[in-house]
Amino acid sequence: EDQVTQSPEALRLQEGESSSLNCSYTVSGLRGLFWYRQDPGKGPEFLFTLYSAGEEKEKERLKATLTKKESFLHITAPKPEDSATYLCAVRRGSNSGYALNFGKGTSLLVTP
Amino acid sequence: NAGVTQTPKFQVLKTGQSMTLQCAQDMNHEYMSWYRQDPGMGLRLIHYSVGAGITDQGEVPNGYNVSRSTTEDFPLRLLSAAPSQTSVYFCASSRTSGGANEQFFGPGTRLTVL
């Protein structure tokens, strides 16, 4: 059975204090690992898709990396506006089509 | 482009009532899906569709019906609402070809069943 585990559940950082969020997964036939950002009361907003081990993608202060067992979302010099819940999801190749299996998320708070 | 739109934003039902949550997208996406999000549970797939006239069950389909008569619309029907269906519901859509299959989410419908 597919499993997606995110850690930590919650993270509090000071502005400028870099850190990483972890997403470990077990899935047969990975067809993509996705990172989303979710602000309170809103729908998830797409950030990145990673397809193969060694792949990296960057967007502003965020950088996502992928290995065969986990993905990291690195946040460099975060700002208060980076505060949100970050969701990780995997898509597998099977009869389930394009369904995503989500982790429970990491709630990030960046204080000034 | 409006992207993925959902109505209503908030709804309160009594146990046993029925209702339809609306979802529409204007990106000509083939794939559409419904998730529910509960505290401590993450997003869970209810139903999905890979094109007009084609639907299938996800992880938690009981108590919900869907249909897909057009590419744009994918309504979710609650047949007889139960307190266990109190949740936030998200509709999502994506392409099914071309490599970039990221799903785009709507703003959600917050449903309370009393």
Image (cartoon, rainbow, N blue to C red):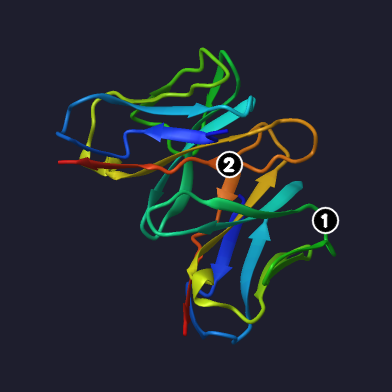
x, y percent for residue A20: 64, 77
Please give the name of the residue rendered at 70% of the width and 44% of the height, measured from the top-left corner. A92
Residue A27 is at least partly visible in this image: no
On the image, the x and y values in percent for residue B53 come to 56, 13
Q: Position of residue B54 (x, y in %)?
A: 58, 17
Pick whichever, A85 or A95, lies toward us: A85
Q: Is residue B33 above or below residue B67?
A: below
Measuring 26% from the left and 43% from the top, which residue is drawn there? B84
Question: Which numbered tag is attached to residue B104?
Answer: 2
Q: Chain of mark 1?
A: A
Identify the residue at image location x=58%, y=41%: B104
| Residue position for label 1 | A52
Residue lying furthest front: B1
Label 1 crowd (10 A; few <14 / some 14-19 / many >=20): some
| Of the two numbered discs 1 and 2 in the rendering, the one whose residue sits closer to the viewer | 2
A19 versus B61 height, above or below: below
Badge 2 marks a residue whose secondary structure is: strand
Q: Amino acid at mark 1?
A: Ser
Query: Relative to B99, is A88 on the left or the right?
Result: left
Q: Is residue A8 above or below residue A102?
A: below
Is residue B78 among what the camera can see? Answer: yes
Q: In the image, residue B57 lies at what x, y percent? A: 50, 29
Badge 1 marks a residue whose secondary structure is loop
- Which amino acid lies under the numbered mark 2 shown in the image of this protein? Phe
- What chain does badge 2 belong to? B
Determine which quarter of the picture holds residue B62: top left
Total labels: the figure holds 2
Label ID, residue A9 = none
Do the numbered discs 1 and 2 sit on residues whose CB atoms are within 8 Å? no
Q: 10 Å neighbourhood of mark 2: few (<14), some, or many (≥20)?
A: many
Decide: is A35 above or below A112. Answer: above
Gap between marks 1 and 2 measured at Cα: 22 Å
